[in-house]
Amino acid sequence: QVQVVESGGGLVQAGGSLRLSCVASGSIFSINAMGWYRQAPGKQRELVATITNGGSTSYADSVKGRFTISRDNAKNTVYLQMDSLKPEDTAVYYCNTRIKNIMFREYDYWGQGTQVTVSS
């Protein structure tokens, strides 16, 4: 069994910063891509940023230059550093990980989500 748990959300003023963390644990053989998605009220879930196990990153245009994704493979952890936050960044942020379990089967696992609220 695999668990994915996010942390680090909260309330921040516009222009401020937050750092999200996501830890995967359990019956893990290897982790491929890791990423962050977000879903604002009344909107579809959207991709924010991804990082491969080799460290290649990609970002949504709306967060380029403000958000930075990174990972610590030894800790099965992915981070999202969010700077220069805007009210439109307000959403529930979800961690997604593509994990090969100890049965060598690969699945996408999602965390429970962490709320980020940016006040104007």
Image: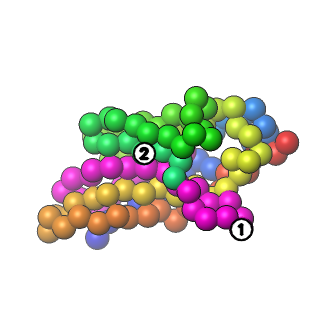
Place of residue 83 in the rendered image (x, y in percent of width and height, measured from the top left):
64, 32
Q: Does the magenta portion include 67?
A: no
Q: Residue furthest top?
A: 65
Residues 59 and 76: in front is 59
Q: Which label was assigned to residue 50?
A: 2
Kind of residue at badge 2: Thr
The tag earlier along the polypeptide, 2 or 1, is: 1
Q: SS of the residue at dot 2?
A: strand
In-image side of 2 versus 61 (left or right): left
Instruction: Specify the segment rendered in magenta.
Output: 20-46
Kind of residue at badge 1: Gly
**In the rendered view of the protein, which quadrant contains the N terminus?**
bottom left
Up/down of 16 relative to 7, above or below: above
Q: SS of the residue at dot 1?
A: loop
Q: Which residue is mark 1?
A: 42
Dot 1, crowdedness within 10 Å: few (<14), some or many (≥20)? few
Q: Residue at x 38, y 42 (%)?
A: 51
Residues 90 and 27: in front is 90
- CA distance for labels 2 and 1: 23 Å
Q: Residue at x 32, y 35 (%)?
A: 55
Place of residue 76 in the rendered image (x, y in percent of width and height, measured from the top left):
33, 47
Mainly helix, strand or loop, the magenta region?
A: strand
Residues 39 and 118: in front is 39
Q: Which label was assigned to residue 54?
A: none
Q: Does the magenta portion include 21?
A: yes
